[in-house]
Image: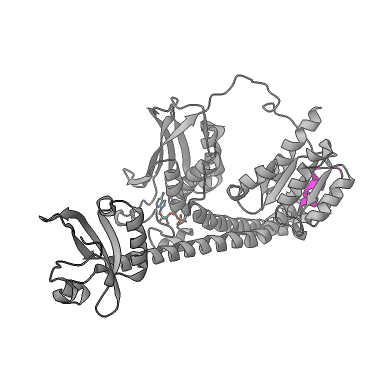
């Protein structure tokens, strides 16, 4: 290997790859064919690295084809000494231009797909806010009119209005939720709850539909299971709710059985729980079973006409079960109907022996006299919130339409709590919260703040914690939910 890299031998194949005859290459320096950029890099490397070739068995570089095009090669070779002690580089080179091209295309396709997926979720997140805000008003006002002593002939219409609005909202939530789960944005939370109670509440919430169709809905919960567990009751509730509501929907005779069985304890001390949902309904034809867990698919095209639905329920359930490292399966029920099953591991919750703490005691409370600042720019929401607060006999309620006004009002007067919309003009809710938490007056800086938001908690939770917001109420809020949260944060004052 003279340091000028003269080619001593080359395979006749060179014609196939580079267009040259053997003797057009032999006797010339490799450098003549090397891509100028590669040549620069190569020369620097050769100078800087002692014994470059023994350290770099595999090389990748571009060589000029006889037609002027550059092609990518990789080589595998080493330096040997011939009988005269001359250094020779011997190795093989492969044309990987096609491979490189394919890799580039693949990367481009991947970037494009990622971009599209990003745009999709951004679009959905914007739409979620845009759709939920007016829906909030529709649902809220329907609620309010219903509680406002409607005339009997209006009652039916109002109920239909409320039902339709709530179904539409559920559908929007499903679509958004699926998107969120699908893009890996869902994190499971942990909160303690009573397993038996949890199942019974869900069963109870479906009792209306079940009774209407004369179906039984029963639950069997293994006594060996821990009484309380630490899990995401919202997500677990979504799983159970979806399966139970499907079971009722697709069953005309008989009923639904929910079975929770203990399968022991894993090495981390978690309870291994088998969830089983049996129904005596129409079942699912064998050839459809593989598709029912996909988004937007139903077992038959008749389904939508006859039963409604979007085909999102099971897709969401499947992914949520997977978040718990479980796998949901379908099997036919003996004697007709469906069985859905999955096994997940749930952390038991050890209750501390502090019975009788103030939190546990049922307390009848009212919001009587509490002064509340409502920072909310949407007029319909302003009216709604004011109506509810008035009904609950709160004291002074002041409404600010933007972040700046909220701060001005807050400086002037004392408030027991702030309801804070996150999207507001001038200062958004986050900025207002931050400014309040850094106020010099300790009474002011510690005021409880509840965020009102149409975006899901998962997306803003971190930010909310950072700026010191105590809790949040999802829009569209139900009166019960708002009431409960208000009580939670007004409570300490009452105990003093
Ligand atoms: P949806 O209920 O909105 O149609 P799902 O994803 O929840 O969507 O279910 C997908 C399909 O699976 C349903 O349309 C139905 O055909 C079938 N399916 C789900 N659960 C059952 C069940 N318990 N019995 C019979 N068919 C079911």
Q: Nearer the viewer, residue 289 or 254?
A: 289
Image quadrant occupied by the C terminus? top right
Q: Which residue lies at the image location 23% right of the left edge and 60% below the top edge?
A: 75
The answer to which image quadrant residue 485 occupies is top right
Q: x, y (%) of residue 296?
A: 44, 60
Q: Would you place residue 274 above or below residue 357 in this image?
A: below
Q: x, y (%) of residue 309?
A: 48, 58
Does residue 79 appear left or right of residue 277 in this picture? left
Image quadrant occupied by the N terminus? bottom left
Q: Which residue lies at the image location 79% right of the left edge and 36% below the top edge?
A: 366
Q: Would you place residue 463 above or below residue 229 in this image?
A: below
Q: Would you place residue 131 above or below residue 431 in this image?
A: below
Q: Would you place residue 128 above or below residue 72 in this image?
A: above
> From where the camera sits, is residue 400 visible?
no
Q: Nearer the viewer, residue 288 or 253?
A: 288
Furthest toward the top, the residue is 353
Q: Which residue lies at the image location 73% right of the left edge and 55% below the top edge?
A: 428
Q: Main secondary structure of the magenta part?
A: helix
Does residue 231 appear left or right of residue 477 in this picture? left
> Is 393 one of the magenta-colored residues?
yes
> From where the camera sits, is residue 30 visible?
yes
The magenta span reads: 385-395
Does residue 38 appear left or right of residue 186 in this picture? left
Q: Nearer the viewer, residue 270 or 81?
A: 81
Q: Quadrant of ligand 1?
A: bottom left
């Amino acid at each position: 290997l003279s340091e000028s890299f003269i080619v001593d031998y080359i395979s006749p194949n060179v014609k196939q790859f580079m267009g040259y005859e053997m003797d057009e290459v032999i006797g010339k320096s490799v450098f003549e064919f090397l891509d100028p950029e590669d040549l620069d890099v190569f020369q620097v490397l050769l100078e800087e690295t002692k014994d470059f070739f023994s350290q770099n068995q595999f090389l990748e570089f571009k060589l000029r084809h006889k037609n002027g095009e550059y092609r990518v090669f990789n080589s595998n070779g080493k330096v040997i000494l011939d009988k005269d002690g001359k250094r020779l580089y011997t190795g093989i080179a492969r044309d990987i231009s096609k491979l490189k091209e394919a890799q580039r295309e693949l990367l481009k396709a991947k970037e494009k797909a990622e971009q599209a997926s990003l745009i999709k979720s951004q679009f959905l997140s914007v739409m979620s806010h845009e759709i939920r805000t007016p829906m909030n008003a529709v649902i809220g006002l329907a609620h309010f009119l219903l509680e406002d002593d409607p005339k009997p002939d209006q009652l039916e219409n109002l109920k239909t209005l409320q039902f339709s609005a709530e179904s539409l909202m559920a559908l929007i939530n499903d679509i958004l939720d699926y998107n969120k789960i699908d893009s890996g944005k869902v994190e499971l939370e942990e909160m303690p709850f009573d397993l038996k109670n949890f199942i019974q509440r869900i069963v109870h919430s479906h009792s209306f539909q079940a009774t209407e169709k004369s179906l039984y809905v029963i639950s069997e919960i293994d006594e060996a299971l821990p009484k309380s567990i630490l899990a995401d009751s919202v997500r677990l509730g979504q799983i159970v709710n979806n399966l139970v509501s499907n079971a009722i929907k697709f069953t005309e005779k008989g009923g639904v059985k929910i079975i929770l069985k203990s399968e022991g304890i894993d090495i981390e001390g978690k309870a291994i729980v088998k969830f089983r949902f049996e129904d005596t309904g129409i079942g699912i034809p064998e050839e459809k079973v593989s598709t029912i867990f996909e988004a937007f698919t139903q077992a038959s095209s008749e389904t939508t006409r006859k039963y409604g639905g979007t085909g999102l329920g099971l897709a969401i359930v499947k992914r949520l079960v997977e978040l718990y490292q479980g796998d949901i399966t379908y099997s036919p029920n003996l004697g007709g109907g469906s069985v859905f099953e999955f096994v997940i591991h749930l952390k038991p919750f050890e209750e501390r022996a502090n019975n009788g703490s103030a939190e546990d005691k049922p307390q009848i409370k009212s919001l009587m006299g509490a002064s509340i600042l409502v920072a909310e720019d949407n007029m319909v929401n302003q009216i709604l919130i004011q109506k509810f607060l008035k009904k609950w006999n709160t004291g002074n309620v002041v409404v600010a339409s933007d972040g700046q006004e909220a701060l001005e009002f807050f400086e002037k007067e004392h408030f027991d709590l702030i309801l804070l919309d996150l999207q507001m003009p001038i200062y958004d809710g986050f900025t207002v919260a931050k400014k309040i938490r850094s106020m010099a007056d300790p009474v002011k800086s510690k005021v409880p703040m509840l965020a009102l938001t149409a975006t899901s908690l998962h997306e803003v939770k971190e930010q909310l914690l950072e700026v010191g917001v105590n809790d949040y109420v999802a829009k569209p809020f139900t009166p019960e939910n708002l009431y409960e949260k208000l009580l939670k944060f007004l409570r300490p004052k009452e105990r003093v």
